[in-house]
Image (cartoon, rainbow, N blue to C red):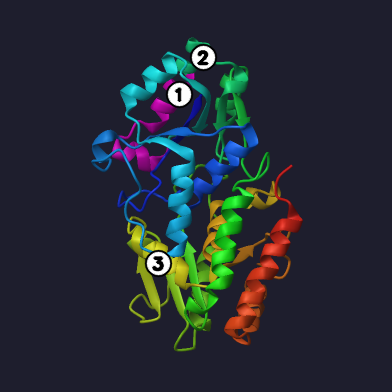
């Protein structure tokens, strides 16, 4: 018996222009497998089929490196049928061929409305189909991976589904997957770029988000302050975001030490994360309130970056900042660190992460 896993995205390094949290998905799937006693999953993407790559097997786009080997290993371990089609997937659910359904929650937003995508409709139809097929509440598991489910949804479906929050209800990434990544990072730390190489990955302008889902306004100031402090020839600031967000966030868009990466250029993103050593993490205020670990923290650990986070003291007091002065102190400290010292800082964050136990 196998289960179904649905997600708004793909598992490989694809070029679809959407926000990306795909780089920790295999670690999350492995954690789900361990938590619920599952072995294999069919993988369904909410992307419209006409926007999907023309294939149904194997991961594409990964470079020849040790990290890629880990991704491929867990893909082969956990994924039975990759990119199962819409018709076949609904048929399997209707015939109750799956042990459990793990459905990434979807919601309507301005971006998907503009593209005329129907991911939220598919998500809701999946729930209805599963209920009609006889799946129990314990067999329909809704994954709220960013605290985005509305009260309306919860009230409507709580009698029929089980809603869980990875990183609060169970680990958001398996210890096996993460442990292998950490070991590779430690053993190959010399391959990191010299200097301070900071990455920010995500939307910068979130003014059109629903209330409570905007990122803290300190983000722009934090980006500009890091840019000003990058005074060494080896220092770099990489922003993985929309072009208009990049041009509005930095002081000098044409500066050589600033790198803009489109969010769909995932092969470049993969390589940039491998080469960098600091991840700026400014997220929704409610993440800190709920002690919720976002995807970017997991991605930092996977690729060997030290997360410098706004108001995340529950995870690390040393690498959290409450204002720009705190951020400056962290960077002044980093500037005094050798490459070996930065490895020590990475290990220190790992210890803080484990000690925090960000799940019940």
Q: Is residue 63 above or below residue 235?
A: above
Q: CA distance from mark 2 to mark 3?
A: 43 Å
Secondary structure category for the residue under label 1: helix
Secondary structure category for the residue under label 2: helix
Q: Nearer the viewer, residue 218 or 180?
A: 180
Using a 10 Å C-alpha cutoff, classify the residue at mark 2 as few (fewer than 14 neighbours), some (14 to 19) or many (20 or more). Answer: some
Residue, x 44% and y 19% (percent of image)? Answer: 93
**x, y percentage for residue 67?**
47, 61
Secondary structure category for the residue under label 3: helix
Using a 10 Å C-alpha cutoff, classify the residue at mark 1 as few (fewer than 14 neighbours), some (14 to 19) or many (20 or more). Answer: some
Instruction: Give the magenta range.
Output: 109-127
Mark before the other along the chain sequence, 2 or 1: 1
Residue, x 47% and y 33% (percent of image)? Answer: 41
Quick check: marks 2 and 1 in contact, CB under 8 Å? no
Q: Nearer the viewer, residue 307 or 40?
A: 40
| Residue at numbered disc 3 | 271
| Residue at numbered disc 1 | 124
> Does residue 179 appear in the picture of this structure?
yes
Callout in the foreground (3, 1): 3
């Amino acid at each position: 018996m196998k289960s179904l896993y649905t997600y708004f995205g793909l598992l490989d390094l694809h070029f679809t222009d959407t926000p990306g949290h795909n780089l920790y998905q295999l670690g999350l799937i492995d954690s789900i497998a361990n938590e619920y006693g599952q072995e294999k999953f069919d993988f369904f993407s909410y992307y419209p089929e006409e926007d999907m790559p023309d294939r149904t097997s194997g991961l594409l786009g990964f470079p020849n490196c040790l990290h890629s080997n880990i991704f491929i290993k867990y893909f082969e371990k956990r994924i039975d049928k990759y990119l199962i089609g819409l018709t076949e997937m609904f048929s399997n659910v209707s015939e109750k061929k799956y042990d459990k359904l793990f459905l990434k929650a979807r919601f309507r937003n301005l971006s998907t409305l503009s593209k005329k995508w129907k991911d939220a409709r598919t998500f809701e139809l999946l729930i209805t189909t599963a209920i009609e097929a006889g799946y129990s509440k314990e067999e329909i598991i809704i994954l709220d991976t960013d605290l985005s489910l509305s009260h309306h949804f919860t009230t409507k479906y709580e009698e029929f589904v089980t809603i869980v929050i990875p990183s609060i209800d169970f680990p958001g990434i398996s210890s096996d997957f993460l442990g292998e990544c950490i070991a590779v990072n430690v053993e190959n730390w010399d391959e990191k770029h010299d200097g301070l190489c900071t990455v920010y990955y995500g939307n910068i302008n979130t003014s059109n988000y629903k209330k409570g889902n905007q990122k803290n306004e300190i983000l722009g100031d934090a980006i500009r302050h890091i840019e000003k402090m990058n005074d060494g020839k080896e220092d770099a600031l990489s922003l993985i975001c929309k072009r208009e967000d990049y041009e509005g966030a930095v002081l000098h868009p044409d500066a050589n030490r600033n790198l803009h990466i489109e969010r769909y250029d995932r092969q470049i993103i993969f390589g940039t994360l491998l080469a960098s050593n600091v991840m700026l993490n400014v997220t929704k205020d409610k993440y800190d309130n709920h002690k919720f670990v976002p995807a970017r923290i997991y991605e930092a650990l996977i690729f060997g970056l030290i997360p410098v986070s706004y108001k995340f003291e529950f995870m690390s007091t040393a690498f959290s900042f409450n204002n720009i002065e705190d951020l400056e102190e962290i960077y002044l400290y980093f500037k005094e660190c050798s490459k070996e010292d930065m490895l020590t800082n990475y290990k220190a964050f790992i210890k803080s992460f484990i000690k925090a136990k960000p799940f019940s």
